């Protein structure tokens, strides 16, 4: 059984969504973001104390995009990953990692400032810059979506799961009005996927 530690709005949602799209059995173990560094059992899995963590038999992993790649390699083949001779593969690979390294990682700063910083430090230059950079980089996604329904081409892939995640947080963090309308429409269409709805319901249930 695949076990995903996280729940709620954390990056574990990416992994649960991938598992749902692939029809894999999994469970979510709820872990509070505020307790990851103080819970000895969790720190034994990830000494750095961040979410998500995934276990599959003897395998223990951190990094949500790496987990998605693992699931595809271990339990594939899957149409969520184009073959290396597919013309869309390079674009797929680029945006699979773009979603985290170029957008979501920046938003960690904004989330931390908004919800964990002392009140007098919540509206700070660094957090504003992080959102500015994420928004400026998102033009890469908007430009791509002008020409195709999905981020790598005409088929839904794991890259869509990756890049959608940070924009699912837009209203929560408070920058939704700055997101390009093309990206907003794209995210709305992805949210309607049955696999996403199942993953979100299970994630929220475990976070409750």
Image: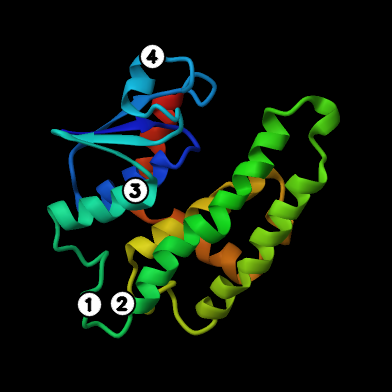
| Label 1 CA crowd tier, 10 Å (few <14, some 14–19, many 20+) | few
Question: Marks 1 and 3, how far apart in space?
Answer: 23 Å
On residue 40, the disc is 4
Residue identifier under label 3 = 17
Which residue is found at the position 45% from the left and 25% from the top?
207
| Callout 2 touching callout 1 (CB < 8 Å) | yes
Of the image marks 3 and 2, the number of the one nearer the N terminus:
3
SS at mark 2 in the image: helix
Residue identifier under label 2 = 89
Q: Quadrant of the N terminus?
A: top left
| Callout 4 touching callout 2 (CB < 8 Å) | no
Q: Describe residue 3's horizontal placement relative to residue 108 as left or right.
A: left
- Give the vertical position of 68 relative to 96 (above or below): above
| Callout 4 touching callout 1 (CB < 8 Å) | no
Which residue is found at the position 21% from the left and 56% from the top?
72
On residue 84, the disc is 1
Which x, y percent locates residue 20?
Answer: 27, 47
Question: Marks 4 and 1, how far apart in space?
Answer: 41 Å
On residue 184, the disc is none
């Amino acid at each position: 059984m695949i076990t995903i530690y996280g729940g709620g709005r954390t990056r574990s949602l990416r992994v649960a969504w991938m598992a749902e799209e692939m029809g894999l059995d999994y469970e979510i173990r709820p872990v509070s973001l505020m307790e990851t560094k103080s819970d000895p059992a969790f720190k034994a899995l990830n000494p750095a104390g961040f979410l998500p963590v995934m276990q599959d038999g003897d395998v223990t992993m951190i990094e949500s995009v790496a987990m998605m790649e693992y699931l595809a390699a271990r339990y594939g083949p899957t149409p969520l990953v184009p073959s290396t001779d597919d013309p869309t593969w390079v674009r797929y690979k680029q945006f699979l990692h773009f979603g985290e390294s170029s957008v979501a990682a920046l938003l960690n700063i904004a989330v931390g400032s908004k919800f964990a910083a002392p009140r007098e430090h919540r509206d700070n230059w660094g957090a504003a810059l992080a959102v500015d950079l994420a928004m400026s980089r998102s033009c890469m996604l908007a430009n791509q979506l002008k020409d195709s329904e999905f981020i790598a081409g005409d088929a839904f892939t794991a890259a869509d799961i990756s890049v959608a995640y940070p924009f699912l947080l837009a209203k929560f963090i408070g920058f939704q009005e700055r997101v390009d309308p093309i990206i907003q429409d794209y995210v709305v269409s992805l949210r309607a996927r049955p696999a996403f709805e199942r993953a979100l319901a299970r994630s929220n249930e475990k976070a409750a």
